[in-house]
Image (cartoon, grey):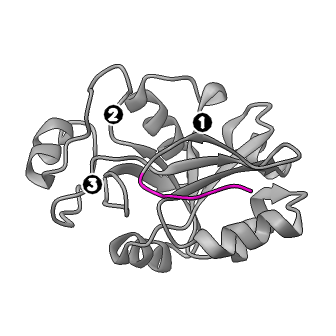
Amino acid sequence: MYPTDTVYAFGCDIYNNKALERVCRIKGIKMSKAQFSFICSSLSHLSDFSRNVSTPVYKLMRKCLPGPYTFILQATSTVPKLFKSKKKTVGIRVPDNRIAMAILEELGNPLLSTSIHRDEDLLTYPTDPEVIYECYKHVTNITIDGGFGNNEESTVIDCTGEVPEIIREGLGVIEIA
């Protein structure tokens, strides 16, 4: 687990199939049904996982990122192969958090990322890294203490249609014209 610019998250190398399966087990979902985001160090990985990104959407992403936003985009054929599914979309994030960026730099590729709890388990996110560690130490290999985190998720913007649409208001404030 590691801090982001929003909530603490479970994460793993997107190319490590066993780790992907483990995160799915922790979250209690089937890999084929997973709706996880990819945490990237920059938009340079955009074409690896998404396709048909229009110029206005790209400009919107450049304006917002790094920051507390998740952009839902049309997925390339790589994404369904990673999840052994028919996944047609992918969430892309570039967090404004030095610890997350250091992990990405060391790893050399994006991380799969998902918030630390299942929505039905908690009403609010734990923010104290010691409490988070105590809650999840039995299911994770490491918990990085990045200090108290936020308890609000990222703002999610669906960019798969004609016009971007905010599907979850979170920490990021944005107006879509």
Q: Are marks 2 and 1 in contact (CB under 8 Å)?
A: no
Q: Position of residue 43 (x, y in %)?
A: 68, 74
Residue 112 part of the magenta segment: no
Residue bearing the label numbered 1: 35
Apparent side of residue 71 relative to residue 21 in the rendered image (left or right)? right
Q: Which mark is residue 117?
A: 2
Position of residue 63 relative to residue 116, above or below, is: below
Question: On the rendered image, what quadrant is the C terminus found in?
Answer: bottom right
Which residue position is annotated with label 3?
150
Please give the name of the residue rendered at 44% of the width and 38% of the height, measured from the top-left corner: 23
Q: Position of 84 compared to 68: left or right?
A: right
User: What predominant SS class does the magenta segment belong to?
Assistant: loop
Residue 83: which disc? none
Where on the picture, by quarter, is residue 27? top left
Q: Does dot 2 land on a helix, a strand or a loop?
A: loop
Amino acid on which disc 2 is placed? His
Element assignment for label 3: loop
Give neighbour class at mark 1: few <14, some 14-19, many 20+ (Cα, 10 Å).
Answer: some
Question: Image point 43% across, 52% down: which residue?
Answer: 11
Q: How far, Cα to Cα, is label 1 from label 3?
A: 21 Å
Against 140, residue 177 (above or below) is: below
Mark 1 vs 3: CB contact within 8 A:
no
Range shown magenta: 171-177
Q: Earlier in the sequence, mark 1 or mark 3?
A: 1
Closer to the chain start, of discs 2 and 1, is 1
Query: Residue 74, percent across and down?
Result: 82, 48
